[in-house]
Amino acid sequence: MKRYDAIVIGGGHNGLVTAAYLARAGKSVLVLERRPRVGGAAVTEEIFPGFKFSMFSYVVSLLRPEIIRDLDLPRHGLHILPLESTVTPMENGDYLAGWADHDETRRELYRHSPRDAEAYDEYGRLMHFMAQAVKPILSMVPPDPTSFAPGDLASLWKLGKHFRGLGAERLHALVKLMTMSSADFLDEWFETDVLKATKSASGIIGTFLGPRSPGTAYVLLHHYMGELDGVFRAWGFAKGGTGAVSEAIASAARSFGAEIRCDAGVSKVMLKNGRAVGVALENGDELRASIIVSSLDPRRTFLQLLESDSLPDEFVGDIKRFKFRGSSGKVNLALDALPSFTCMPGIGRQHRGAFSISPSLEYVERAYDDAKYGEFSRRPYMDIVFPSMIDPGMAPPGKHVMSIFVQYAPYNLNGGWTDAQREAFGDAVVNTVESFAPGFTSHILHRQVITPLDIERITGLSEGNIFAGELALHQLFFLRPAPGWAKFATPVRGFYQCGSGTHPGGGIMGASGRLAAMTILKNGA
Amino acid sequence: MSYDAIVIGAGANGLVTAHYLARAGKRVIVVEQHPAPDPSADIGWIPDVVIRDLRLSGAGLRIDEPDPWITAPLPDGGTLELSRDVGRSADAIRRISPADAAKWPDFCHRMRTLAGVLERLYLVPPPDIETTDPRELVRIGGLGLYVRRLGKQAVIDLARILPMSIAELLDDWFTSDALKGLLGALGVWHLKQGPRSGGTAFNFLHHHAGSPLGVFRPTRSNVTQALSSLPGVEIRRDARATVLAKNGRATGVTVEKSGDTILAPLVISSAPPRATLQPIAIELDPEFARAMSNIRAHGVVARGTLELSGEQAYSTFCLAPSLDYLERAYDDAKYGRDSVAPYVEVQRTNGRLEVHVQFVGRGGHEDLSKTVARLLRVQPDRLELSAAPESLYHGELTLDQILFMRPVPGWSRYRTPIAGLYLCGSGTHPGGGIPGAAGRNAAREIV
């Protein structure tokens, strides 16, 4: 039987990135994917005949440029198309728009508030700078602050020096970003409610927090990170859907010699003398390798693939405490015509960008209130895009696909998610869109409603958390996924973790997968 | 009459600053806007060093040590009473949840260790993270070493727990709603946040500082009264004062009613930072002025007294039956209204029954007394409440407004851009709920 240098469990984008980097370094690598296709939560599927959807994750922004370069992804079919605008319809029939053209955005802001238009440039400069300051952390293996090992101390020292080098004013801004609520942070800059609501909405995505909850300001930075890399704009579509990103990474991995096997779910990691030696598949097969890497979330990685007696009690406790609390859902629609929004009637360039249903801070905060007490939002926050407007291949000629990211839909719904509840949730989404775009409902040909429970069932992400574990301050950096075990190694020798549940996690970034591969190679796989 | 220093405000911090300055040989006058001393109890830890330095024990300082320290009603009609003895508290908790009782001692010890770290940070000026001064770097290094010597668990707990919500922290440990409610209330104390908001675990620990193991309510005392009776500084009451400044220098204060001017080269204000600096805004640079206007200081508390005939049975009676109850109380305030079902606590100190109510919104508070009276099952006319329009802490204790960020980033050393003008109130490090700590730190910086 063939013995591999490394087996990667899970063919999501991080697992594929790890596999590609290991294969590139000359290792024999096998990727095992439970589903019939690779991608995990970054998949494109033809859900209705002729209509293709990025089923879960739908925009690309943070994919690390070094990964695109190292793996030569454009050669493997990666093509990012820019998302050109964001339009927020307001309850009074007006709108707030942000366009690709900076001057146009400024003019639009000026219409709402001359003061905010002035502040916007200064805000942008600060955020650009802060994003630059935080970026090195994304490419860094977190040091362990409790360790006295020279490597950790040196790393902590470097980190301290880096932050002190920012200068007082920016250091203070960083502390504020890390600790404040996005609403409070934006209150210091702007007065236009709809602007604050739309900006703060990006801070709540994937969290079980509202715009007034401390800890949401930090995510505002993410929007300025992608842009800075100069590779593409802040948000974009992958041609062919987000599944095309996964396919490109898979293709790169294969080109380096990695083997990828689908329909191959792993049931257990096999240990011998406390060391990982192989995996047992759901079909009973056993495969062996010197290194086993899991890209599954921490709960599945440690509580499902391993027997709990193979791990220290304290560590098991930490993993059990790691929070998931999925809060988002997705509604995918096949349309026979695009909807016309009251605030900007007709069909036009606005449909090549996003519509953000975040008319006021109070609207978004109330959406959160529903979820706090176990209900889905009656009037949810939504991020709507029409991928077929940018990539016509996603729908039959003359028809369209509409992707609606919805928050909040709590995993632990009162009474649990049933088919009836799923449809009620879908109705709430459709009715809310209808209130901003009358007549829209009549254009719906097909509808797919995805609850957090569905996300969990299909992708395996625990509690349907799209980041494989909440991106909260106490679950980041050297605490992700557990204190002392944030460096991709695990308490089991020969067993590594590389998914979004490790540092830095979140979004289609690939940074976790890359850092894990580098760590494995450094440790001498 | 000439003075070396004028202190604005005769609260605990103002008086502590005044007395430390007097001890250093300065002629000090304290100007206070209210005509009479506030009879209500001082709530919060009085650092031992302040008691010792100012010989407060000889000045009639009285510190309450109620036992049990809290009583909360249970849904079945009984009560949960927690004592100063950890074992007895565990026995009480066992009647509602054996699992929670088993964890109680460990929880108390973990929280005590973390509060100990805060206590150490609070008795000195906040660490200056931008410094290049070797002495300050050594001091910061010393703090770091102290924390690491507490062990691995303490370092991890600090990093993990401080940014957490009190709800997450308590859910990690306990199952009983009653227990989590009465503990969770301390996490939102004087804060416009609900128990599910990040940073409320820090607020909980802040208010545990100075309390013994297993006691999660701040000390009550008469420290302001004791300080008022100490000789050595002149106190002028009924004298609302405004700072005078010229060419970037403080020159004294004017007293509102009489129109008097008192001159001194040093002016130290224990009033809220924003209120202190507003009248001389023209002397400030725009960045600093903007930072001042950005201080978050929402008023969320109503306080008052309750008149009851006959003996009241409890020293502290807490109505916060669950974390969800607190969260819903906050929801109302989030949208500007008084809580329909507020968190209410009644504290008996020296025969007075003082009431603490959270949350209040922005508007009038017509129904608040009625609501609270109904919850406490007393006649509304027995209750007198007044809502504070601004934070009684002169700035909420959120993670972005503590340590070197308090009162505004870069100005945490009690100084202001106006030479000779200092701050010494709750709006400065370490903040409210620790009467005298900011006052002492400020006086030491000035001297």
Image (tube, grey):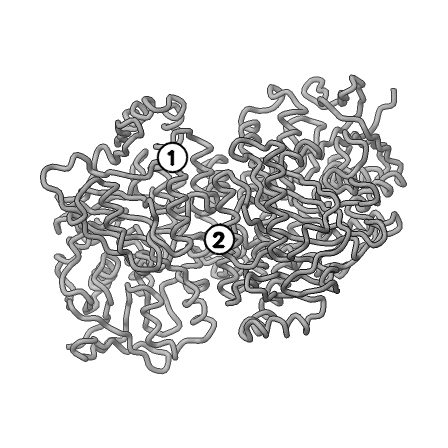
Query: Residue B136 lies in what quarter of the image?
Result: bottom left
Tell me where residue B310 appears, x and y as whole percent.
9, 38
Tell me where residue B395 appears, x and y as whole percent.
37, 58
Distance between the alpha carbons at the discs numbered 1 and 2: 23 Å
Tell me where residue B186 appears, x and y as whole percent.
34, 43
Q: Chain of mark 2?
A: A
User: Is residue A137 depicted above or below A498 in this figure?
Assistant: below
Numbered marks: total: 2
* Residue positioned 20% across, 64% down in the render: B22
In-image side of A46 versus B35 (left or right): right
Task: Choose between A436 and A282: the one closer to the eye.
Answer: A436
List the single residue furthest toward the bottom: B247
Task: Choose between B12 and A154: the one closer to the eye.
Answer: B12
Task: Point out the image quarter for the N terminus of chain A.
Answer: top right
Residue B180 tag number: 1
In-image side of B20 versus A468 (left or right): left
Label 2 crowding class (10 Å Cα cut-off): few <14, some 14-19, many 20+? many
Task: Point out the image quarter for the C terminus of chain A.
Answer: top right
Q: Which residue is mark 2?
A: A212
Tell me where residue B45 appears, x and y as whole percent.
27, 46
The amino acid sitting under disc 1 is Lys
Q: Secondary structure at mark 2?
A: loop
Q: Tell me, yes or no, if residue A15 can be seen here.
A: yes
* Residue positioned 77% across, 35% down in the render: A11
* Residue positioned 63% across, 53% down in the render: A434
Q: Secondary structure at mark 1?
A: helix
Query: Residue B78 lies in what quarter of the image?
Result: top left
User: Is residue A370 depicted above or below A319 in this figure?
Assistant: below
The amino acid sitting under disc 2 is Arg
Label 1 crowding class (10 Å Cα cut-off): few <14, some 14-19, many 20+? many
User: Is residue A502 depicted above or below A204 in this figure?
Assistant: above
List the single residue furthest toward the left: B310
